[in-house]
Amino acid sequence: MRTVGASWPGAAELWVDVDGTDVRALAYVDLVGTPEPGDTVVLNTTAQAMKLGTGGLAHVVAIPDRLPPDRPPAPGHLVKARYTPLQATVLGVDEQDSQWHATLRDADDLFGMPVVTADLHSALPAVLAGLDRSARVVYVMTDGGALPLWFSRTVATLREAGWLAATVTVGQAFGGDLEAVTLHSGLLAARHVLGADIAVVTQGPGNLGTGTRWGFSGVACGEAVNAAVVLGGRPVASLRISSADARERHHGVSHHSLTAYGKVAMAPADVVVPELAGDFGTKVNQQVQRLGGRHQLITVPTDGLDGALRQVPVRLSTMGRGIDDDPEYFLAAAAAGQHAGDLLLHDG
């Protein structure tokens, strides 16, 4: 290893000399230890070989000459990234060894807490832009994308800036302030343990799609709506909208949103439709009517949201496009955040 670059909670970036070529890599320090210049490291280069758009980083599998010490015995028996070489044992907020087990043992009500659901991880900061900073917002990360929350510099920066109160990782995802077995127990933990006013549910970085109707990780948005309703929450569905995506299935309202909310979500949600001008706005309004039979369509004005988005303390980017390249994507997410905040004020 040649040099260590930026670091943030749970992760360190480094440059590794591989046969005379500098390779950018990432180490999850809680799993493999903290790399130092001169270390020999074992890398997984799958992301670079496949030219993946999210990160494109090699990952440190081990620092063989300086392995981290064995962890001392500690409570917690949840194993995440199960049966992989880097499986992690964590203390689940909902398990018997947790101080919160009694709180969550019989908990089954979110008491109307707004739960914003979104397809892509890149929607998270935009949703927050639409919210008043006084709201206590907890991010619940599902396992459709990256499993370690540490991969997300966006989350680290939002936490540091005070835009996010806390995080919960559910399913096979790990690295949050709290770990939970399921999305259901994760939402309950956000409400009853972390005191969330609003929860935002998205996958981690690294959306997976196949160009088929059902083969994409964002289908979980529909399941998140179902979970929120079952638990007595108020689901707020953020639409994936784009005016810049050249693929017809993602132009206007993405088929991801139409399938997840129109087919998978069996319970009603507030589907937030940003108020957009011109032919593109007309197209969006026509497409979203397919969701009106089951859900309540909520039109939200976008006045002032562009300015709010430009105050976000992280770089806004989706599929390599920034706010000036594809403003409607970010406006749609911010509108969902604004509606969730309005619900909070109304209920309060």
Image (tube, rainbow, N blue to C red):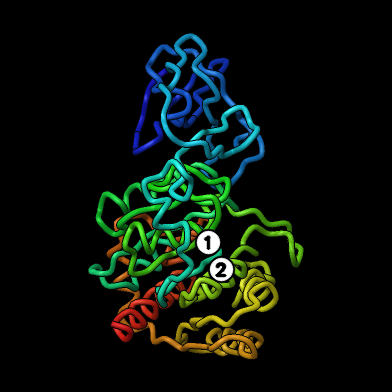
Asked whether the viewer can see residue 150, the reply is no
Q: Residues within 10 Å of mark 1 (few under 14, many from 20)?
A: some
**Secondary element type, mark 1:** helix
Question: In the displayed structure, would residue 181 be above or below residue 16?
Answer: below
**Outermost residue to the top:** 65
> How far across and down, in percent of the image, does residue 256 sit?
64, 69
> How far across and down, in percent of the image, does residue 157 sit?
32, 49
> How far across and down, in percent of the image, does residue 61 sit?
55, 24
Q: Residues within 10 Å of mark 2 (few under 14, many from 20)?
A: many
Looking at the rendered image, the quarter that the C terminus falls into is bottom left
Q: Nearer the viewer, residue 220 or 207?
A: 220
Marks 1 & 2, CB-CB < 8 Å contact: yes
**Outermost residue to the left:** 134
According to the picture, the residue beneath numbered tag 1 turns out to be 184
**Secondary element type, mark 2:** helix
N-terminal label among 1 and 2: 1
Q: Which mark is residue 227?
A: 2
Q: Is residue 156 left or right of residue 146?
A: left
Which residue sits at x=52%, y=75%? 237
Q: Nearer the viewer, residue 67 or 277?
A: 67
